[in-house]
Image: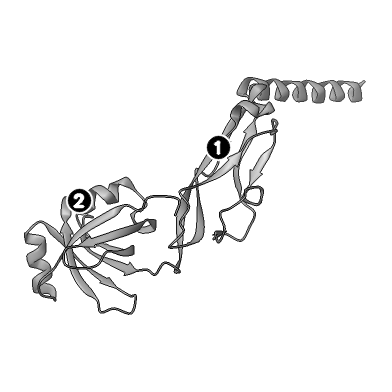
Amino acid sequence: MAGQIPDLHAEVRTGTGKGAARQARRNGMVPGVVYGGDTDPLAIQMPFNTLLKKLKEGRFLSTLFNLKVEGQEDVRVICRSVQRDVVKDLPTHLDLLRLRRTSKIDLFIHVEFINEEECPGIKKGGVLTVVRPDVDLRVTAGDIPEKITVDLTGLDIGDIVHISDVTLPEGATPTIDRDFVIANISAPSGLAASDEDEEDAGEETEEAAAEE
């Protein structure tokens, strides 16, 4: 396992139905359900402020969590939906799906770029333009990579890094079929402008010669 799975703390929620859910919200909690994994659904609740903070951090729906509930065994879960108040846009309910270690899930994995000092394009003043700082991969729940690595060694100005150029962790595959771009080495703005000026000048010279 490459990365540390973050913990998600919750409590067992007593009672089910709308009445119990409303009571949980009055107590500053967000009700939820944990389902799947050949086990009966478990009614839970978690502090509203905790959930709101995690939602604001981003990618809550694509992050694998280690769910910790007192009196229950820890289980790996991924959030499948968060219901929100239609007026206030605040969370009112969440559904968590239990996962086995062999389950396949789609997650955004961070991209790390290395060896910039060995990149001829950057040495010439080129700029690393990152198109996708994270890529959506289908991975095994028990072996989620912390990141994928792009080696910039030998790349020159104008070179493009596609997903096919990257060695992915074993068992990981892109969720997008096409060979999408992750990054490129672009020319510095001054050089790009100079090249455009030269092209314009060349076109003007050719037009003048044609008129003569």
Residue closer to the observer: 67 or 93: 67
Of residues 147 and 33, the one nearer the viewer is: 147
Quarter of the image for residue 92 reads bottom left
Q: Is residue 204 left or right of residue 15?
A: right
Identified by mark 1, the residue type is Phe
Residue 190, image x and y in percent? 63, 20
The image quarter in which residue 20 lies: bottom left
Q: Position of residue 127 (x, y in %)?
A: 60, 28
Which residue is at the far right? 212
* Left or right, 27 with reference to 5: left
**Quarter of the C terminus within the rendering:** top right
Image vertical order of residue 74 relative to residue 186, above or below: below
The answer to whether residue 80 shows anywhere in this view is no
Tell me the crowding category of disc 2: few under 14, some 14 to 19, or many 20 or more residues within 10 angstroms, Cα based.
some
- Judging by the rendered image, the residue that carries numbered circle 2 is 50
Q: Secondary structure at mark 2?
A: helix
Residue beneath label 1, please?
A: 113
Residue 158 seen in the current view? yes
Q: Nearer the viewer, mark 1 or mark 2?
A: 1
**Residue at coordinates 22% horizontally, 53% vertically from top-left?**
51
Q: Residues within 10 Å of mark 1 (few under 14, many from 20)?
A: some
Closer-to-camera residue (170/164): 170
Percent x, y for residue 159? Answer: 69, 37
Q: For the point 57% across and 35% down, which residue is it?
A: 114
Position of the N terminus, as image quadrant, is bottom left
Identify residue type, mark 2.
Thr
Q: In screen coordinates, is 8 left or right of 111?
A: left
Which residue is at a point 63% across and 57% down the rendered structure image?
Answer: 178
Above or below for 206 versus 9: above
Label 1: state its secondary structure: strand
Quadrant of residue 129 in the image? top right
Left or right, 46 with reference to 109: left
